[in-house]
């Protein structure tokens, strides 16, 4: 067997070990039997919320067991084919099995990373907000580039992207934009993107073609699940309506239908500018509850969310990632050290390498914290 194939097989075995650890594979079949017994209870659906939670947990466990067994059997089957092909001198069978193992490496890595998404709200849909920092038109243009980058990323994942609100820049770009991104683990993947993003490039808006540095901040928080109760009293908020600015022509709103809700105690402000004022109230209230829930998550997971807590203003000293387009091309994550010269790929949504590294770092930090607490 070639050394490269042996290395790939070892990589897959390490991924399998992590998958087994995350779901406690030794007890998983027994727990699945318990779930199957519970769903046979005729009184289960007397409490729909509890029943739905049980069904989700059962499905997640079934998926985890199925994934582990699929990768494990795929590895063993291909290794056996390589051994058989080498014994019989059949180079075609060996090449086919080696290709199968190579493909399985990527699958194992993806499933390993998905297994890291086991936080309380990781599987939820998410809200994503982008705000231009100091720098006028440059920063507004950078904010629009980030909006394009994240929508491209979400589309590649097969997620649904819905525009919640947008404030256009005075000359170009956007001052702020908010999206709802829906899909399994949308929040889990995107939560590591909260922070300040820095761009260095030759400005297309500078007649002297000078290099400019721009900043924009990204906020990510989960859509509150229906099973999570967040109470917001009427005296805790202020609701304002206003006329939303659109792209012009037939798309301009002609009524004061947009809604802004301000949470008085925290200063959190959320907006929505769909056509219906009633719809906007519902959307904005859900966004507010999600923000409040995110604050609670941050308190309970301070170590994991340190980068989110420390974002500060969109300017020097607070950035989590730098995107340099001139004088050289480089995107570097300042938390993990992961970098690439493929700036075009990143700006077109190839973000998984950064998210994966941050996820792994967060899990390692959580494991260290738990070990320290046990000591």
Image (cartoon, helix red, strand yellow):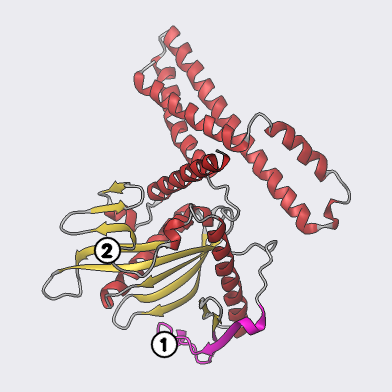
Question: Outermost residue toward the bottom?
Answer: 255
Dot 1 or dot 2, earlier in sequence: 2
Of all residues, the one furthest to the right in this rendering is: 42
**Which residue is label 1 attached to?**
249
**Residue 123 appearing in the image:** yes
Q: Nearer the viewer, residue 317 or 186?
A: 317
Question: Residue at point 38% right, 56% down?
Answer: 349
**Residue 248, relative to residue 305: is it above or below?**
below
Q: Is residue 42 above or below residue 20?
A: below
Q: Position of residue 107 (x, y in %)?
A: 48, 37
Quarter of the figure with the C terminus: top right
Give the number of marks: 2
Location of residue 240 by image quarter = bottom right
Residue density around tag 1, few if under 14, some if 14–19, many if 20 or more, within 10 Å? few
Q: Secondary structure at mark 1?
A: helix
Distance from disc 1 to disc 2, alpha carbons, whole Å, reads 33 Å
Quarter location, residue 232: bottom right
Query: Which quarter of the figure has residue 370?
Result: top right
**Is residue 44 toward the left or the right of residue 230 in the image?**
right
User: In the displayed structure, would residue 148 be above or below residue 135?
Assistant: above
Residue furthest to the top in view is 87
Residue drawn 22% across and 59% down?
325
Q: Quick one: SS at disc 2?
A: strand
| Residue 247 falls within the magenta-colored stretch | yes
Query: For the magenta stretch, what is the residue range?
Result: 233-259
Residue 142: x percent and y percent?
31, 68
Residue in view at x 81 percent, y 43 percent: 38
Residue 259 percent coordinates (x, y): 55, 84
| Residue at mark 2 | 199
In front: mark 1 or mark 2? 2
**Residue 165: % across, % down:** 48, 76
């Amino acid at each position: 067997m070639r050394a490269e194939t042996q290395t790939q097989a070892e990589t897959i075995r390490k991924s399998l070990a992590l998958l087994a650890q995350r779901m406690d594979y030794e007890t998983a079949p027994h727990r699945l039997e318990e779930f199957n017994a519970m769903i046979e209870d005729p009184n289960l659906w007397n409490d729909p919320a509890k029943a739905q939670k049980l069904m989700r947990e059962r499905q997640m466990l079934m998926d985890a067991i199925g994934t582990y067994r699929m990768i494990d059997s795929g590895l063993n089957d291909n290794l056996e084919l390589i051994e058989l092909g080498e014994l019989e001198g059949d180079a075609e069978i060996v090449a086919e099995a080696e290709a199968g193992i190579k493909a399985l490496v990527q699958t194992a890595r993806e499933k390993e990373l998905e297994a890291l998404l086991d936080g309380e709200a990781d599987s939820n849909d998410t809200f994503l907000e982008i705000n231009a920092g100091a720098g006028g038109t440059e920063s507004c243009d950078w904010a629009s580039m980030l909006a394009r980058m994240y929508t491209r990323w979400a589309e590649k994942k097969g997620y649904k992207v819905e525009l919640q609100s947008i404030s256009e820049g005075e000359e170009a770009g956007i001052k702020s934009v908010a999206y709802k991104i829906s899909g399994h683990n949308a929040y889990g993947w995107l939560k590591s993107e909260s922070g300040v993003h820095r761009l260095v490039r030759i400005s297309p808006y500078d007649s002297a073609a000078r290099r400019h540095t721009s900043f924009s901040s990204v906020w990510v928080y989960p859509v509150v699940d229906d099973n999570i109760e967040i109470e917001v009293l009427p005296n805790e908020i202020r609701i304002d309506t206003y006329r939303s600015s659109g792209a012009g022509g037939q798309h301009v709103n002609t009524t004061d239908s947009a809604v802004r809700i301000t949470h008085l105690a925290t200063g959190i402000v959320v907006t929505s500018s769909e056509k219906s004022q009633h719809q906007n109230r519902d959307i904005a209230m859900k966004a507010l509850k999600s923000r409040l829930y995110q604050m609670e998550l941050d308190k309970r997971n301070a170590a994991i969310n340190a980068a989110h807590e420390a974002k500060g203003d969109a300017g020097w000293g607070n950035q989590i990632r730098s995107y340099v387009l001139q004088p050289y091309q480089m995107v570097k994550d300042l938390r993990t050290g992961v970098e690439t010269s493929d700036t075009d790929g990143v700006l077109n949504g190839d973000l998984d390498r950064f998210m994966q590294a941050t996820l792994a770092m967060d899990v390692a930090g959580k494991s260290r914290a738990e070990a320290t607490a046990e000591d």
